[in-house]
Amino acid sequence: MIQYAPYGSKEFNRFIQSTLENIAKSFDFLFSRDELIALVLGGGYGRLEGGVLRTEGNERLYNDLDFFVVSRDIPSWKQSQISRMLKNLHYELSDELGVEVDFSDLKSVSSLAKTPITLMWYDLLCGHQVIWGNKHALQNLPRWKAEDLGISEALKLMLNRAMGLYFAKNYLDGSDPEKQADFINRNIHKAYQAISESILITEGNYHHLILERQQLIQKQDLSPYSSHESLKGLIDTAIEFKLQPEIPRWDTNEFRERLAEAICIFEEVYYAIWAAYFGVDVLDLKSYHNLLSSHKDQQSSVMSIAKNFALNVRDCGINPAQFAEYIKYPRYRLFYALPWLLFGSAETPESIGRVLGWPGTNDRASLEKRYVELWQRYN
């Protein structure tokens, strides 16, 4: 029997196996193998390092089930039809299992060989389970190595985990934060996990398995990234949470202190990784903005510049005075404004509104809403 959750009981792992077999049966019923080639489980359970949540003597899934769908070359109308069916299956299974059951956009087998390296695809290549269809469906993916991951992947990961901290802070400041204790706690731990992963990517020493990363980060000198001597211990705790999550007893002051500490450390590491990306020793807010504004995107072909320009015009309208910003991928706007959103940097509403494509907006709540909309589009 496959052990999807290393700290789960045999019965719990049998439950996961049974769940996956039922999902495979749903695919047999819904889809033709003339159209789809394979359903591949990625994420923690696909790498055989899924978490198990114990509540009142029961074991439950805690992590999402992340599926990747490999298709044949099929017409766009058929892709749309299958995508609608997958969306319906997502809702049905998520309600049934109590965790998000996500299906990727269709990935044609003919496009696999040209897939650019990202952290998501690297992790999938290294650790996955094919639960339906061709067991060798991913064999055409490039055979990347960990050192092939660029620092840009670490920065994208940091951006997404920064948003988890932002939402956690909003919940903590809300009317009933105790109801969101699990979300807040989980995203604090995810931030430390991301710090670990981002540092290892930056050092060219990443590993797809979390227990291997735990050993690697303990050997790593973290002083160039953070002055907090407690960081290795916090990362250890976050990794243990990944495998054996628990929902802690609510204590408002304790949660506030933990979240404030996590944001403080996250800010240090965030700037340190950007400094490594730019090839400078240290960054402050001014030099961060200057280098971010002057730095050329890695993909600077005529086609990519034209695509970026079109996306920025769609999001922000036309402003000829900001042409240098318009030829950057729109995620640039999110990176630029993140210190204002999460770290408390004192930029004016006018400057943030300009960067986010909403000039003339002075209301912070409206600007934050605008930021979240752009993040949902480009995360």
Image (cartoon, rainbow, N blue to C red):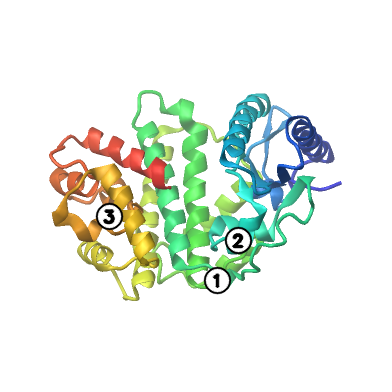
Spatial distance from mark 3 to mark 1, Cα to Cα?
26 Å
Q: Secondary structure at mark 2?
A: helix
Return the x and y of residue 337 as percentages of the image width and height: 27, 50
The dot on residue 122 is 2
Name the one closer to the observer, 54 or 289: 289
Specify few, some or many for label 3: CA neighbours under 10 Å numbering under 14, 14-19, or 20 or more. Answer: some
Residue topped by disc 1: 148
**Does residue 36 appear in this view?**
yes
Return the x and y of residue 244 as percentages of the image width and height: 66, 44
Q: Quadrant of residue 363?
A: top left
Are the residues tagged 3 and 2 within 8 Å (C-beta)? no
Are the residues tagged 3 and 1 within 8 Å (C-beta)? no
Q: Is residue 60 above or below residue 6?
A: above
Q: Amino acid at mark 3?
A: Tyr
Are the residues tagged 2 and 1 within 8 Å (C-beta)? yes
Q: Residue at x 46, y 37 (%)?
A: 184
Q: Quadrant of residue 104?
A: top right
